[in-house]
Amino acid sequence: MKHLRSIEELGVEGLRHLLDLSDHMAEINRRPIPKVPALRGKTVVSLFFEDSTRTRLSFETAAKRLSADTMTFSVSTSSVNKGESLRDTIETVAAMGVDAFVVRHKSSGVPWQISRWTEASVINAGDGWHEHPTQALLDCYTIRTALNRLDGFDGLHIAIVGDIKHSRVARSDVWAFAALGARVTLVAPNTLLPPSLKGWPVDVVHHIDDIVAKVDVLYMLRMQRERMHEALIPSLREYTASFGLTPERADRLQQHTLVMHPGPMNRGVEIAVDPAELPGSVIGQQVTNGVSVRMAVLFDLLGSGSGLAGEG
Amino acid sequence: MIDNNTHNRTSGAVLITGGTVLDRRAEQRADVRIIDGFVTDVRAGLDPEDGETVLDATGCMVSPGFVDIHVHLRQPGREEAETVESGSRAAARGGFTAVVAMPNTEPPHDSLAVVEMVRRLGEQAGLCEVLPSGCITMGRAGEALAPFAELHAAGVQIFTDDGNGVQDPLLMRRALEYGKSLGITLAQHCEVSRLTEGAVMHEGGCCSRLGVPGWPSIAEELMVFRDIELCRLTGAPVHFLHLSTAKSVDLVRAAKADGLPVTAEAAPHHFTLTDEMLSGFDPIYKVNPPLRELTDVVAVKRGLADGTIDAIATDHAPHSPELKEMPLDQAPPGMLGLETSLALSITELEIPLQEIVALLSWRPAAIAGVADRHGRDIEPGVPANITVFDPTLQWTVSSAGLASKSRNTPYAGRSVRGKVRHTIFRGAPVVVDGVAQR
């Protein structure tokens, strides 16, 4: 594997391989000194053209635990503000000797453009509405460990609730969950669905009450407040009434049902209940697992193949 | 007022030998003699005379010069992407003896000064006739009418805000009513902009998967429908630029069946490429209106075959590499077209060669109001604007080989059939064996 740009590109074999590798990384993360020399001498550059806290820190933590050198490039302090083009930025940074770019950009497809201009590996940390493959990996890893489903998701029913149309998380999760065998249901009004779902391995319902008591995983997406201005929903109040996880709905969840969210959460909008009071919430575990799966991705792309032996 | 019949750049005698004359009449093997800018003799077996330039046309078609009613020459304002001269050279290499320059320059074609400058630059280049279009509204802003009468008096026949559709139905109605009394043609870029805010590519399965904002077909079709009805109301001619959807083609077909004075064009990329090309997020495939689905491609081809669509027009839209390397949602739309139009038409359209030439030559010449000097049957006495092309030559498109200043062709590496060999403009061989002479 040269790049990790999308789950669609990764395929089911690559997905399973990275999840297995994440188990090894999770074991490292449980050690007293969670650091190994696997990527010593490798340089990983974080290129964040869009704000992010958890994803950037998660990648940097992952790289450091594998002993890679890390550099961070954020738009606010860079030459991009002086008018430097994307290509010039990439070629300039690449000239310093870089093994991988971790890229976050508000425009869909930027990781594909960048991979045409550099020999380094490109890891998509979120591109526009398109994909966020490491989020899908950590989501799969979280479900797999929390429900003990090492062999796959056959028979699992997962609902993804909210603004699917503008969600890179949904575009990665749908393919990943389905590839592992889950039944995926999208829960959204038509205005928050993509214009066409042709070819998507999903079914659709338009009210959360239709599925809340049935699913094994309830995946709540962030509802962005600016969507209000685009006539996509009448009001946040109405959104919460039809699609929010309210205390009444939380009571209807099955005992084993997981509640997930990619963060950052809009309290009182998509989750109108204290997550600490949701027994099925694995939102904190998602963040923890993010480090392990990102270590797996970096190791798989940059590792020498000599394994993970040695303590840090 | 410019007198279009004053051709000061004529040349001596030219003899085109060994070719087949292809115009509205039956094909005929004939040599063509040109003296002082006009065809003087069309017969088999003409012998070269002393001092005559002889152009070999063995295996080639000798047809009326092509007319592209939709090109962006970028001057004034974007000379790094194209100039009137470089665009004229690309046009000549593509077999075009006349082009209509779109008005979205900086400043735009809403004043006599800009229109006359573009025309003068075209005359100075001397590679083809550059026909400036005029804006429908000042600054293409959709608020106040441009000075139609003043621009028309300077020779402008086609008025358009291309790049923008005229959103305001009242303003469009007034433009048609006022324009009708002048005998001009309004050309509409059909796009209801409220439905395409932020749009990057065709709205459908592909954009849904790629997470890219969609440009719905209905944004085009609503304006096609509106302007057909405004045409019915006012009786003023309407030309539809770059039709891209199946429904748009159907609407125009029905309007023609009703006898309305509507005309339409289609661009080669809309009958050769689909939205799937954007799967790699390369802005080279970003164009407005966007590449659509296979059903639309089939419908556009059918519209070209059955006469619903009158002209192949390239929407030649040069952009510098820096702009086409921006993220997909920020990169400007548009692709080159002038130097690949004939080849793509021959390669992709399953219609007789004479019909292809009709779509490239005399039908667009009529829309542009230049049928007195372009697209005429090749016979003694007509102005010598002539294209000689080999309809069978197989070649591979290479962006480095283009005369345009820009390189944004989506066809680089594509094998195509049919190539322009010579272009004769006002009697002068401006392209000989594919090489521009000026």
Image: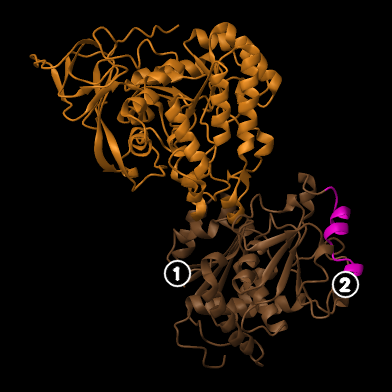
Chain colours: A brown, B orange
In the image, what residue occupies the spot 33% across and 30% down? B94
Q: Is residue A160 magenta?
A: no
Closer to the eye: label 2 or 1: 2
Name the mark on residue A252.
2
In the image, what residue occupies the spot 59% across and 11% down? B179
Q: Is residue A236 magenta?
A: yes
In the image, what residue occupies the spot 53% across and 60% down? A111
Please report the bounds of the magenta region as a residue range: A234-251
Q: Where is residue A189 shown, x and y percent of the image?
A: 77, 53
Nearer to the camera, A181 or B117: A181
Q: Is residue B222 left or right of residue B300?
A: right
Chain for disc number 2: A
Would you place residue B196 above or below residue A123 in this image?
A: above
User: For mark 1, what is the residue?
Assistant: A97
Q: Secondary structure at mark 1?
A: loop
Mark 2 / mark 1, whichever is N-terminal: 1
The amino acid type, in three-letter code, at marker 1 is Gly
Considering the image in quadrants, where does the C terminus of chain A appear? bottom right
Q: Where is residue A246 shown, x and y percent of the image?
A: 89, 66
Chain for disc number 1: A
Asked if residue B213 can be seen in this view, the reply is yes
Say few, some or many: other residues with alpha carbon within 10 Å of mark 1 (under 14 / 14 to 19 / 20 or more): few
